[in-house]
Image (cartoon, rainbow, N blue to C red):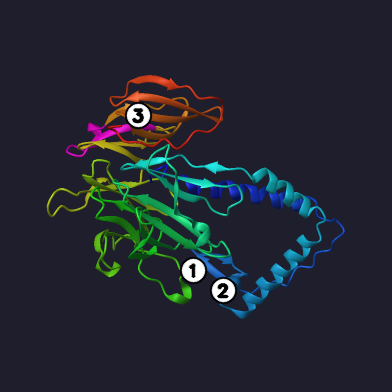
Amino acid sequence: MKPTENEFLCSKIIIAAGISVLIFLITSCAHTKYTIKYPASPQTNCVEYYHGVAVNDPYRWLEDLNSPQVKNWVEEQNRLTFEYLGKIQQRESIRKRLTELWNYERFGVPFKKGKRYFYSRNDGLQNQNVIYMTESLEGAPGILIDPNLFSKDGTVALSGLSVTEDGKYAAYGVASAGSDWEEWRVRNVETGADLPDKIEWVKFSSAAWTIDGKGFFYSRFDKPDDASKLTQVNYYHKLYYHKLGEPQDKDRLIYHRPDQKEWNFYPETTSDGRYLIISSSQGTSPKRRIFYLDLKAPNAEVTPLLTEFDAAYDFVDNNGTVFWFKTDLNAPRGRVVAIDITSPSRENWREVIPEAKETMTGVTVIGNRFVVTYLKDAHSQVKIYSLDGRFEYELQLPGMGTVSGFYGKKED
């Protein structure tokens, strides 16, 4: 995932933290004499057997979201909750003070595509950050995507953004009501109009553009049943290529594993446009398998590179056939290794940046140098290394804090 293109998503974490503080303050100020009478929650005699062990599941009936009994139970719980919150006398003063603290202008770190710059901005009280575009850092910005216009109630969110290398098109994901399901559209940056392209049933994926901007790679699941699309478990993630201007049913299947229903696939293209990198995960584990596809070789097939879920492997960049990865293999605090795909055996790997005393949190290649962020004593530290791993200097920061958003190209 490109770090800066999704910088605007970080605000969701901050918002969630603010809501948590609000709930804590409100409940702490609740009237202690208020008596709570909870709705009845019947228990059943549901028992499951796992490896010969009986496991009681008396609330299994609550998993049937279409049941009238469950709907009534939820309505009663909501009625109790809001009745309780409504009796808290300090609620309005807390809301007012938190709004005052939260009301300030915020910007995301700009990133450049082609001759254009893109960044996010929030005027202070907007539900979602707005994506802006400008032709120069000094030029007047224009709104590219305003997620606050997606719906009146604010329940439709911008879930992802990916811009072509020439800055002409922006693919963006939209998610409704907090769902993991995303629908991706493509916007013409020059005109601000959406193309007819519509990509549905996307989960756990971004859009990885080819260097010519004619299409992008993405991952999706098969269309689920309407009745259970929000509750059923999804299996058999599939990686596709979408060509601009064509309907989704014409998209080309690039890779899937019918023998591994729990594997997910995340695509990204190398900065030189030569390779498609496929990171495979299983469940929520940070460990990865890595595959790649040579986009310039005729009739090329997806090739396994790292074939075990034995460590985290985050693709950083490449120099021809040499791929750089940030990994915690034999280095729990992180290191950078170089793997030549023409001789990928582990004994041929080269350690570029060794594990340090501090925890490595990010690696980016900018201007033929590694920009590496570390976590030291609960604050960020930034060090610069040459591409052969030689330490050059530490970037002096204006003060203690958290640093993120480094973005650029190897040739910058």
Specify few, some or many for label 2: CA neighbours under 10 Å numbering under 14, 14-19, or 20 or more. Answer: some
- Mark 1 and 2 residues: CB-CB less than 8 Å, in contact? yes
Distance of label 2 from label 3 (alpha carbons): 50 Å
Q: Is residue 336 magenta?
A: yes
Q: Quadrant of residue 241?
A: bottom left
Amino acid type of the residue tagged 2 in the rendering: Leu
Q: Nearer the viewer, residue 273 or 350?
A: 273
Distance of label 1 from label 3 (alpha carbons): 42 Å
| Residue assigned mark 1 | 230
| Residue assigned mark 2 | 65
Residue 289 rendering spot, x and y as whole percentages:
32, 47
Residue 256 rendering spot, x and y as whole percentages:
28, 60
Q: Nearer the viewer, mark 1 or mark 3?
A: 3
In the image, what residue occupies the spot 73% across and 69% down? 79
Amino acid type of the residue tagged 1 in the rendering: Leu
| Residue assigned mark 3 | 370
- Residue 311 showing in the rendered view: no
Residue 108 rendering spot, x and y as whole percentages:
49, 42
Q: Which range of residues does the magenta coloring cover?
A: 335-349
Counting residues from the N terminus, which is met first, the one under dot 2 or under dot 3?
A: 2
Horizontal side of residue 374 vs 291, given as left or right: right
Q: Is residue 206 magenta?
A: no
Circle 1 SS class: loop
Q: Nearer the viewer, mark 2 or mark 3?
A: 3
- Residue 404 showing in the rendered view: yes
- Which part of the image, by quadrant, shows the C terminus? top left
Circle 3 SS class: strand
Horizontal side of residue 41 vs 331, given as left or right: right
Specify few, some or many for label 1: CA neighbours under 10 Å numbering under 14, 14-19, or 20 or more. Answer: some
Counting residues from the N terminus, which is met first, the one under dot 1 or under dot 3?
A: 1
- Mark 1 and 3 residues: CB-CB less than 8 Å, in contact? no
